[in-house]
Amino acid sequence: MSAAEARQAGPLVQFWGEFSQSKLAVFGLASTLALMLLAAFAPVVSPQDPYDLAQVSFFDGELPPLSSGGDGAFYLLGTDAQGRDMVSAVIYGLRASFTVALSAGALAFVVGTTLGLIAAYFRGTVDSLIMRIAEIQMSFPTILIALVLLAIFGRGLDKTILALAMVQWAFYARTVRGAAVVERSKEYIQACRLLRLPHWRVLFWHLLPNVCPPLLVIAGVQLASAITLEATLSFLGLGLPVTEPSLGLLIANGFDYLLSGKTWISFYPGIALLFVVVSINLLADRLRELSNPRLRK
Amino acid sequence: MLEVVFRRLVQAVGVVLVLTVVSFVGVFKIGDPIALLAHENATELEIEEARQRLGLDDPIHVQYLNYLGRMAVGDFGNSFVSRRPVVDVIAERLPATIELTLAAFLISVLLGIPLGIAAGLKPESAAAQSIMAGSIIGFSLPTFWFGMMLIMVFSVSLGWLPSIGRGDTVELLGMHWAILSADGWKHLLMPALMLSLTTVSLIIRLVASGMREILLMEYVKFARLKGLHEFRVVMLHAFKNVLIPVVTVLGLEIGSLLAGSIVTETVFAYPGVGKLLIDSINRLDRPVIITYLTLIVLFFVVINLIVDLIYTLLDPRARGTIR
């Protein structure tokens, strides 16, 4: 498709035309979507429910990859110490990781975007208060803040989501504010104010749609970082509880067996984790390239 | 300049105070340390005595003010677990973390900058492409898993390097240092590699993209037209200007490395302050947790200030813009 044709076909088609010039980015998008589907349909696609004791055979514990269990079950990636099929454990782990990262991301997105818009729109004291908090928070590594929060909250699915959201809101707020300050001085926003539209309407109806492109970029980057962060926290024993193992917890469980040479228990969950994060990063990298005119080719 | 330093210090004190309140109140809410500390058949009376000795019966604001007052004179209290002064407990773990962080920092500089320059000079070459691909993977690799894979290859399969602890140490200036013994170096190598992974990738990408942008600048073209030696053009004219953001990021990365050492030390059971923090969280050793957090915040504020000041020295354009 030529550039002129693409421009006629509307912004979405044009965007896809540019996006798909990078084969790696298309691969990233496809595998991210595939992994999300896999996680969403985990109970349907995985060979067994690894947390249903009736389906797990304890006698099949610590089998290496490509072996068969006592009742003829085939274990492509082997089993862990409790006899769970590693393929199923990884798919369910993926589900837990995505659940935490997407929920935390959504929460941070809503809170961060709202605060960023408010800061840019009202300026003054509100602006400096919100942005100063965000700034100070961002001068510390995310892992450190998340660690402190979870040390205070304790372990748990909801607590991990809350801690990650409290870490990530600042990134959304800063991005949105930066974009919104520029938009605010444009004529259409001034027109809205002259029309005396209610503030919330100007903020969410007129300002928000125009700050979306940078938001999309930051959302991709933050999703990847939330998945890694959750895995790390769970590895340290501060994230998810053992009853809902994410990829990070699976790796931590396998760590005990690594030194005795049973490497598959932590190796495959790690490969899965790496694959998820690389896929999302490839996607996010391309979005960033497209949003930055200087890098645009 | 002095005004900037002063304003930053006031801000720093504010941040530290807020943090001590948050962590004090927060840390207060997790569990009852007595339940963990008292031995199984402790009597009611013994438990009550222990509570009073540790000051756990006072209202929380009294405990907080007592804590602040003692902290002001350099007394951070005793660890609930080891019963020794927190400052001593942290100080004896500090050399391990300093060694680890410095080693990772050196690896980041010595590996990241040359690879970044190489990737930035000829972006289309196969070598540059693979360096950049490697840096994407380095970014995406969960560091703790990378550390475990190092253990899998070099400890379990090849048996070359030890996977646990710090090895032999040599005493110098009243502290125990592992880098003074060969065994210590062996123990340090894998943890330092793991810790430097993200920073190396970051520096590669930063230097490479900086080089790419700067080599297109007019003054670089002019230097080439003058017939200057290519090495001189790259190192003196281009690289010097790439260095400004790199120095800033490297400075800030010291903080990230310190935070990352918490994870690294856990993977390698490396006896530094990071491992101490995780152990203290699990044992509800409040004085240690709060002291560690207070110190690390102070450290970050100082690092940020120094980085800002260096930045103004390197880039005259930034003068006057720093708040």
Image (tube, coloured by chain):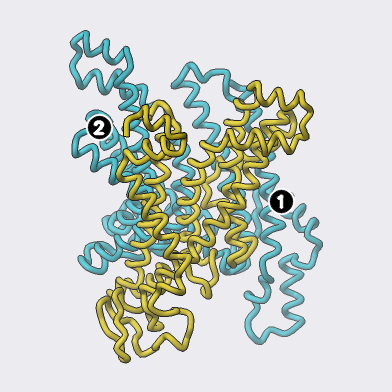
Chain colours: A yellow, B cyan
For disc 1, the chain is B
Q: Residue at x 18, y 10 (%)?
A: B227
Residue at (49, 43) in percent of width and height: B255
Q: Is residue A153 left or right of residue A10?
A: right
Q: Position of residue A262 (x, y in %)?
A: 30, 75
In depth, the one of B268 and B201 nearer the eye is B201
In this rendering, would B59 be left or right of A156?
right
Q: Earlier in the sequence, mark 2 or mark 1?
A: 1
- Whether residue B238 sits left or right of residue B67 in the image: it is left
- Residue B310, given in percent of the width and then of the height, sits at 47, 26
Q: Return the residue nearer the eye: B116 or A86.
A: A86
Residue B42: in sight, yes or no? Answer: yes
Q: CA distance from mark 2 to mark 1?
A: 50 Å
Tag 1's secondary structure? helix
Where's the C terminus of chain A, which quadrant? top left
The label on residue B123 is 2
Q: Quadrant of residue A197?
A: top right
Residue B21 — which label? 1
Q: Secondary structure at mark 2?
A: loop
Q: Amino acid at mark 1?
A: Val
Residue type pointed to by label 2: Pro
Closer mark to the observer between disc 2 and disc 1 = 2
Give above or below for A201 relative to B264. above
